[in-house]
Amino acid sequence: MQTTTKVNAKRAWAKYVLLALAALILALISAASWFVLDGERMRVALEKGVTALSDRPFHVDGDLAISFGRITTVRAANIRWLNPAWSKQPDMLSARNLSLSIDLWSLVRGPIVISMAQADDARLLFEWSEEGQFNWAMGDSDRSKSDERSGPLRLVLGQTELRNVQIRVRHPGMTDELLVDLVQASQQQDAEDMLLISTDAVIDKRPIKVNGRVGPFHELIAGGAINYDFDLEEANVSLKASGHLDRLSDPRAPRMNVELFAADAADVLRTLELPELTTGNIELHAGITPVEEHLDGTLQGNFGAFKLDGKLTTTSLSSLDDFSLLLHSDGPGVAVFGKLLGVDRLPNEPYSLQVDASRNGKELQVRQLSYASDGLLIKASGAAYSWPELGDLDLDIDAKVANLQSFGKLLSLPSLPTLPLTVKASVKRKGVGGGNELQGDFALGNIAGEVSGKLSDRKNLAGSTFSYRAGSADLRELARARGIPLPAESPLPARLNGELALLSEQLRIDRFAADIADNHLSASGQIDFRPADTLVELEPQIKGADLHRLARFLLGEEKAVYFPVGPYALGGKLRLQGSRLQFNSKDAQAGNSVLGFAGSLDFGKKTPSVDARVTAKGGSLAALLKPEILEGVPAAAFSLSTTLAMSEQGMVLKDLQFSLADSTLTGQLSTGWPREPERISFDLIAAGSDLRASLPATPGYVAAPVAFRVEAKGTADPASVQIERLDGKLAEATIALAGKLVLKPVLSADALRLSLKGPKLSALGSLTAWPVVDLPFAVSGTMTGSKDSARMDDFQATLGNSDLKGSLRITTTAKPRIDLDVRSDYLDSRLLRASSKASADAASAVDKASEASAASAASAAKVAKVANEDDKSGKLFSDKPLPFEVLRTFDGSLLASLAKVEGVQQQLQDVHASASLQDGLLVVKQLQGQGRQGKAAASFTLDVRGEQPVVKGQLKASDVIFFVRGMAREDEARLPRHTLESHFSASGNSISAWAAALDGYFWLRSSPGQFRSLDMDVLFGDFASQLFSTLNPFAKRNTYSTLSCAGVYLEASKGHVETAPAVVLQTDRLSVVSRGTIDLRSEKIDFTFRVAPLQGVGFSAGDLIKPFIKLGGTLQAPALDLDVANAAVEGGVAVATFGASLLAGSLWDRWISSPGACAKIEEEARKLRLSRGEKDVPGL
């Protein structure tokens, strides 16, 4: 009974196990069915799997269907396989329809067998980058193939059908993209189990057919012995390839025969989008034939102009441990091969190449290696008995280069000289353990040298020693060959010698010495090549009689100007370990200056860090910082000492101590350079007894020779400027500035205070354009503000008795806006003008300051040269464009009220101005003032909104006098009163353009009066005085001239000004009438004058200098002509009076000499203006 129970228990346990296994299998089948039957889940899994394996995004955008079985079929639509990130092309594969039938068992045993493959409307891209990357290279390219389970074919295709497939090939060596249209391609198995391949394609509209056989198919799968036979046919190209592989996985005795024929090599290259390297036919034969234990390979024929004849004998194609090679090649140039390989700048000249070499184990014999062309000849022969080690050599090399510079671009050394180079060297072995001896001679132009050494037989030639020496009687040939022109002077002899030792992972420089004329360079040290931490330690020293002369030889005249003249001695200790460079040099000499540097530089980060102490001193700062570096440097003794620190946060000069003559600059200066160069902080003190001697000379400005002290502390960046304090004193003048000005993101100010005052303005220096005066001065103001605005309401300035006060408002809500309101009780404008004496004094001051440094003299010469060039135009009006564009950058307004304005001769009172600027339109609504007699007013607009600025305006003055300062009251009372009226318009971007486009009129009418004759010179200049004296001979005899009446009537049209109708002037004795033109484009003047005595005056025309006068020349250089015919003047005036009968016969003299001539000409002028339109008539 008990036994029966045990048996039943065992059976129950087995039943439970079977039930559990059945449940597990059922669960697995259910899970697989659930996964397979869900198409979207399969799509996601497939896309993720292919993307992960290929590292390329893979998408199936259309239908996806899978039919499972031992032969599983996958069908997909709209497939996209994306390119790697470095490519600019989107997809490397796309297909409208794709179908694959895969033998699932081949996934396990390999290789993968695809029994059926079909593709329609597919696009394939094969692309290589400039760096050699291939878009179809996936996974680990270095993975060993030794562990593959079958032959080298990891994928075998059976029956295949491809239709409408486009293949694109892009490679840096190709001239353009190669496009292959695969019309159809099929692969079928025949009765002999061979794969039959048939392809129809089109390349550049050229049909191509490819047919072939390979197999048997079962041997392809097994990696066994196969035969192949392929033919490619095109109209002008034929390619045949056939052969046998005894073992596909590892061929030992392969046979191959390849024949290529083409009518034109250039046509073939052009079709394949390759550079047209050569022309001519192609006939190439290549083959591999097994002969006993060896393989014989041959290559014969020509590819266009290139001829090839080679033979290779080897025991294995996979290893060249045992081979024999004979090769001969001729061609038009090796540059063509460089283009294909992406190597530029190879010599492009006919060549001949011959190679005869063999290898047996470690012994490599080169019986002949020669290359010959017009520019290069190389011959070499020898043996390496422990190849690839170089410790046991017998080698002879002979090389000649016609022009070394031609190889500079190839070697990325563009500065190589245009000189011939010859090299002859040999390496001879001394037997086992004896090493090798190196001996070589070379010549570069007129430089000859030799190299010798003992080559160790140890690994990496450790223990080898070298020595070298070279010399030249004159290095100027080398300088000229490098494009450095040297002046004709004495020769530059040179000598070079040294000794090196190559140790284990170390190069020791025992001695390096070079002598160039009287310059000597020496160095010693070592370079450690240990992979973990490279170390360089050197002690370079260089000295000579003239640093400028050495720089001129090495760098050329243009760059040598930056180096000082005089003896030099530079040297120190240099240590470079990893990314850290340490350099110490205490007593380096350059000219009469001594320089020092002790510190380190760390290149480990993006921004190098520096921590160093810098010192310098010398007898002349100008000799060290020549004008080409910094103009106008004072020629005074100097010294510098500071600690320089630089990091990612910026650069700091700590403990700065600089002296120049008896002036000093101390403190600290920092900047955010190189990342934020605009960020600056400073805490400086400058002091000295002579400001002029302490500053570089500046063209147009000369500092005053006064004692000074300035203390400044603050910060600045693109967003704000904060001055914690700026307190200065120049002689008795003081300056104080403190506060903060915020520029970004919105404009504001925080109590920015300015105070500047002193007993003499000249303490601030002088300007050639505006020589200053020795008057007390004061300027003060406080700028405040909030968001988007800044204002100054307490601005005050005084200079002598003149004063100016007012307010300024700046807003930046949208476009910047500036509103200015100024007032003055008294303003002496003479202080703003340079008198001739003041200009001469200022010029003298500039000249004296310039003599203090050659740099400023050179600068002054440049300014004078530019001024002389400007004067060559001979014109009064400048062609230089005016900066009108600034009026488009902001809006604003101006209000001015000046109680009294003192001029050179005139005095104005109650001067008022009102102007506005809005969107490029400047409107001066009011500009008026009261003179000593009469008043004047003007208004105008300037519109810069269009392509050409346009100005329009008018000017009116009534009862004004031409007053001369110092005139007696009774003389002033007798002066003539004048009325002036003018309307004008013009367009252009310069004064000369405005003159050339001027339209409008100008009327000046004068009432009777009396004036001093000599005042003409004071008021209007020498030429005006000469003209008046010529017209009125009594001006020289009489102190006073009496004016009865005068009228100037001019009209302008497009820059052509003419009298309308004339200019008239009558004194108490004579009458003058003039007519003429001024061409403002050419600035030429053409006026004629008729002078006649008044009727009833007791003198004759003979008492006049000339009755007919002509004024010609230009506005810049007017000229008088006193020999003018009567007819010329009469004809001109006849036109002016419209040919009136008054001019008939003797009526001319009576009319011109009548007291009513002024009124008659004014009447004619009014008629002329009425014909233009009543609104343009003055007085109406």
Image: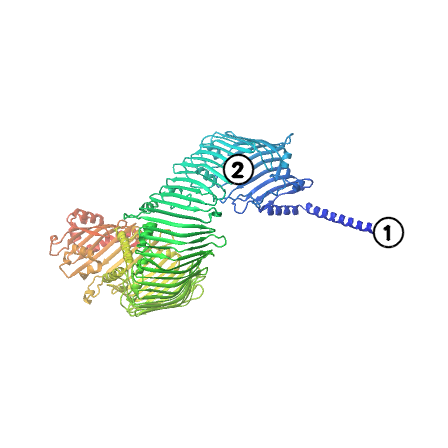
Q: Residue furthest right?
A: 1
Residue type beneath disc 2: Asp
- Horizontal side, residue 137 vs residue 783: left or right: right
Q: Nearer the viewer, mark 1 or mark 2?
A: 2
- Horizontal side, residue 565 vs residue 1010: left or right: right
Q: Residues within 10 Å of mark 1 (few under 14, many from 20)?
A: few
* 62 is higher (above) or lower (below) than 806: above
Q: Quadrant of the C terminus?
A: bottom left
Residue type beneath disc 1: Thr
The quadrant in which residue 219 appears is top right
N-terminal label among 1 and 2: 1
> Callout 1: helix, strand or loop?
helix
> Callout 2: helix, strand or loop?
strand
- Horizontal side, residue 750 vs residue 1167: left or right: right
How far across and how far down the image is residue 335, in percent? Answer: 43, 38
Residue position for label 1: 3
Query: Foreground: 564 or 792?
Result: 564
Residue 1094: image tag: none
Tell me if I can see residue 158 in this picture. Answer: no
How far across and how far down the image is residue 657, in percent? Answer: 36, 65
The quadrant in which residue 66 appears is top right
Query: Foreground: 949 or 486?
Result: 486
Tell me if I can see residue 706 in this picture. Answer: yes
Residue position for label 2: 322
How far across and how far down the image is residue 685, in percent? Answer: 36, 67
The color scheme shown is rainbow
The quadrant in which residue 1103 appears is bottom left
User: How far apart are labels 1 and 2 at the CA level?
Assistant: 80 Å
How far across and how far down the image is residue 74, in percent? Answer: 65, 41
